[in-house]
Image (spheres, rainbow, N blue to C red):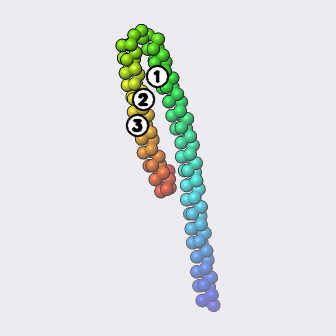
Amino acid sequence: MQAISETKAAVEESAADAAADWDNANRQALHFMIGAQRMIFEEMAFAADAMLDRIRTETHLLGEFTAKLAASHSLQDWKAMGSECGRHQLEFVRREYGRLFRHNEWLVEATSNLMDNRY
């Protein structure tokens, strides 16, 4: 009789352990899915912000180019304008790639944290 009760207790204990393991796995999956969803929304917000910023900057550069083109009256003025606009464009590209590099660093860190369920 004692062997039956010990066996029954062992089965109940292993069932409780299995239920706890299942609950832990479900909790981890839930945290992973919520973290992944949060990252997707943040990526969408970043993409929208980057597009608006790029449009604003390109519009500003186009306005400057148009104003300088209208103000230039000689070939010398056109050369200076082309040089200055080229510098502005290169500065914009440098800032854009710097921002993308920082964003990619954040993305790698966020993905790493998501895999560790700390996000």
- Considering only order in the chain, which callout, 3 or 1, is on the residue closer to the N terminus? 1
Amino acid identity at mark 1? Leu
Amino acid identity at mark 3? Gly
| Residue under label 1 | 61
Q: Nearer the viewer, mark 2 or mark 3?
A: 2
Whether 88 is drawn above or below 110: the answer is above
- What secondary structure is found at the residue carrying circle 3? helix
**Residue 97 appears left or right of 55:** left
Whole-angstrom CA distance, mark 2 to mark 3, is: 10 Å
Q: Which residue sits at x=47%, y=49%? A: 110
| Residue under label 2 | 92
What's the mark number on residue 98? 3
- Considering only order in the chain, which callout, 3 or 2, is on the residue closer to the N terminus? 2
Q: Are marks 2 and 1 in contact (CB under 8 Å)?
A: yes
Amino acid identity at mark 2? Phe
What's the mark number on residue 111? none
Q: Which residue sits at x=58%, y=51%? A: 34
- What secondary structure is found at the residue carrying circle 1? helix
Residue 107, given in percent of the width and then of the height, sits at 47, 46
Quarter of the figure that contains the N terminus: bottom right
Whole-angstrom CA distance, mark 1 to mark 3, is: 19 Å
Residue 81, given in percent of the width and then of the height, sits at 39, 17
Tell which residue pokes out farthest to the bottom in this image: 1
* Residue 11, quarter of the rendered image: bottom right
Whole-angstrom CA distance, mark 2 to mark 1, is: 9 Å
Compare residues 85 and 110 and report the one nearer the observer: 85
Q: Which residue sits at x=59%, y=56%? A: 30
